[in-house]
């Protein structure tokens, strides 16, 4: 259980204001709003355990995946900067938390997790009762979400990564890139996107007709590919992929993530 | 009605799904897909798995691909007739299962699959020549991953915690082959990894499925 506040801090305690209850309130709205405000009250008492901490670099793909999921679910978080450029993620203290020396990892109360795709599954499950349903409603829908989540991890990312790494990350660091790796990856990714085109001509999103985690995990890397690597042509000749891309990147939650990153944000509140 | 798995015993991804079906005592039919004739790239199979890979899975109208997604579906569908390998009832435990499943797919698989592909798949299936440089690099990578596993398994009995989970079983398909090779020393030299592997290999489901999987040339 949480430690109680000391009497000296009682003077500075923020007030809890009960929510306005409209005549049309069903009771559930009041309960949810009350719970939400009590949650923020608890947080503002200095109980840092309420806020999820995301450890990573804001511009990196994997932390963005996690931040997007948090924003979709309206969950406040703190982004704790990890100085990747100076190899902080390879130092012993970091490796205690993420033994493979990668970002992100999160701390949620007593729970510490790494691997962004595992983190977003956890968040989608934990906050299943709020925001969009990111995991499907039935076992069959859930299986489709799992399937396309794995497609991203196993069939898409192996090509997306060398493109972003060689055509975006290395040039920024002024380091030589492997053009052949990038070029080969572009061809492979194009073939994968042809499969996506077929799927998206049948369903609005990858796993069905609702936006899910399976769509979400694609966004950060693909955005760099399209906007920073000069490869919008990969989508331009695929009508359905292009429409899907415009739809998912048009989501308010994603736009908030982009803005948060661009403005150097460290604390997010919905 | 029995579910169908379209694949081959020589396909490590197919083995992953078969292991889960056996663990849960499910009734299933393995429909062989012939790798050598390119059947996995034929239109009927592409209709099930548009990436032309093995396995594909059919449960009535539901068709799935990606072995780990299929496995999750199977473990949930037959939940009442086998061990709890996903820990869906606990947010924290299921999160740890997901973490180590990602580690398997992202860190472990990449290192170990290269060794198997270079030393077995290439020469046996494609008449190619093993690239010893790639093997050496992959062995080094796998060694580093196994160092992390050794540290982890010295703190908990299995990867996700003190309970066996799908995260552990998901490692079996490739590991089975490497254990039967000279590179077994990677596992045998690490005390806790060795014990962990022996625990997995002693399971009846493991013995049944791997009996049908050739491990030598």
Image (cartoon, rainbow, N blue to C red):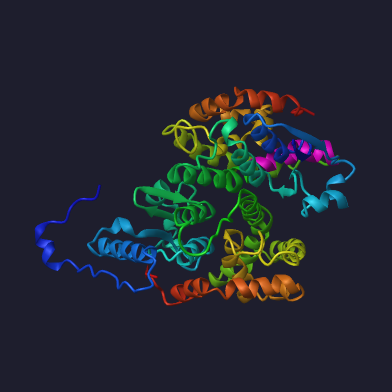
Dominant SS type (magenta): helix
Image position, residue B3 (x, y; %): 74, 38
Asked if B111 appears above or below A124 in the picture, the reply is: above
Q: From the viewer's perspective, tell me whether residue B105 is left or right of residue B193.
A: right
Q: Position of residue B10 (x, y in %)?
A: 77, 35
Above or below, B148 relative to A114: above
**Residue lying furthest front in this view?**
A23
Is B125 colored magenta in this rendering? yes
Q: Which residue shows up at 26% across the image and 58% down it?
A: A47
Q: Can residue A226 be seen? A: no
Percent x, y of residue B172:
63, 33
Residue lying at the far left of the rendered structure:
A8
Q: Quadrant of the C terminus of chain A?
A: bottom left
Q: Is residue A58 visible?
A: yes
- Quadrant of the rendered structure where residue A157 is? bottom right
Residue A262 picture location, percent across and down: 46, 76
The residue sitting at 73% across, 71% down in the picture is A240
In this rendering, position of residue B191 left or right of residue A38 = right
Decide which of A144, B178 is in the foreground and name it: A144
Q: Which residues are magenta?
A: B112-126
Q: How many marks?
A: 0
Front residue of this view, candidates A181 and A218:
A218
Left or right: B59 as drawn, with respect to A138: right
Front residue of this view, candidates B103 and B131: B103
User: Is A60 part of what is drawn in magenta?
Assistant: no
Going 70% across and 27% down the picture, which residue do you hit? B210
Locate residue A31: give its quadrant: bottom left
Residue found 64% across the figure and 35% down from its top:
B20
């Amino acid at each position: 259980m949480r430690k109680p506040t000391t009497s000296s801090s009682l003077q500075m305690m923020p007030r809890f204001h009960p929510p306005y209850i409209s005549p049309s309130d069903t009771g559930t709205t009041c309960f949810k709003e009350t719970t939400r405000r009590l949650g923020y009250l608890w947080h503002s008492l200095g109980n840092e355990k309420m806020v999820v901490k995301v450890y990573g670099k804001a511009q990196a793909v994997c932390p963005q995946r996690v931040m997007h999921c948090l924003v979709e679910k309206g969950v406040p978080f703190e982004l704790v900067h990890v100085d990747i450029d100076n190899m902080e993620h390879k130092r012993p203290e970091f490796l205690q938390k993420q033994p493979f020396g990668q970002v992100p990892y999160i701390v949620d109360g007593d729970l510490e997790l790494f691997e962004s795709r595992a983190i977003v599954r956890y968040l989608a499950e934990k906050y299943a009762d709020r925001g969009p349903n990111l995991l499907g409603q039935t076992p069959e829908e859930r299986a489709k979400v799992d399937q396309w989540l794995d497609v991203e991890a196993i069939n898409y990312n192996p090509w997306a990564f060398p493109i972003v790494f060689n055509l975006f990350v290395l040039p920024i660091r002024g380091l030589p890139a492997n053009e052949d790796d990038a070029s080969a990856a572009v061809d492979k990714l194009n073939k994968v996107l042809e499969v996506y085109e077929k799927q998206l001509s049948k369903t609005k999103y990858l796993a069905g007709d609702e936006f899910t985690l399976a769509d979400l995990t694609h966004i950060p890397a693909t955005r760099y590919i399209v906007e920073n690597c000069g490869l919008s042509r990969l989508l331009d000749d695929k009508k359905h992929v292009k429409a899907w891309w415009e739809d998912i990147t048009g989501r308010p939650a994603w736009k908030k993530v982009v803005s948060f990153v661009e403005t150097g944000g460290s604390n997010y509140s919905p | 009605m029995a579910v169908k798995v379209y694949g081959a015993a020589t396909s490590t991804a197919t083995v992953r799904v078969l292991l889960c079906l056996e663990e849960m005592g499910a009734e299933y039919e393995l429909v062989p897909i012939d790798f050598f004739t390119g059947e996995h790239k034929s239109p009927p199979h592409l209709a099930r798995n548009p990436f032309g890979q093995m396995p594909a899975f059919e449960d009535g109208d539901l068709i799935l691909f990606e072995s780990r997604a299929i496995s999750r579906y199977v473990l949930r569908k037959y939940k009442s007739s086998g061990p709890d390998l996903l820990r869906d009832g606990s947010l924290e435990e299921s999160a740890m299962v997901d973490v180590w499943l990602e580690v398997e797919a992202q860190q472990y698989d990449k290192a170990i699959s290269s060794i198997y592909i270079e030393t077995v798949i290439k020469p046996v299936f494609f008449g190619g020549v093993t690239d010893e440089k790639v093997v050496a690099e992959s062995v080094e990578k796998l060694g580093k991953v196994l160092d992390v596993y050794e540290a982890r398994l010295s703190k908990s009995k299995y990867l996700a915690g003190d309970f066996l989970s799908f995260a552990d079983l998901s490692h079996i398909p490739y590991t089975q082959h490497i254990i039967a090779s000279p590179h077994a020393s990677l596992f045998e030299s690490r005390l806790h990894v060795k014990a962990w592997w022996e625990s997995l290999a002693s399971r009846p489901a493991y013995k049944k499925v791997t009996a049908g999987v050739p491990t030598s040339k």
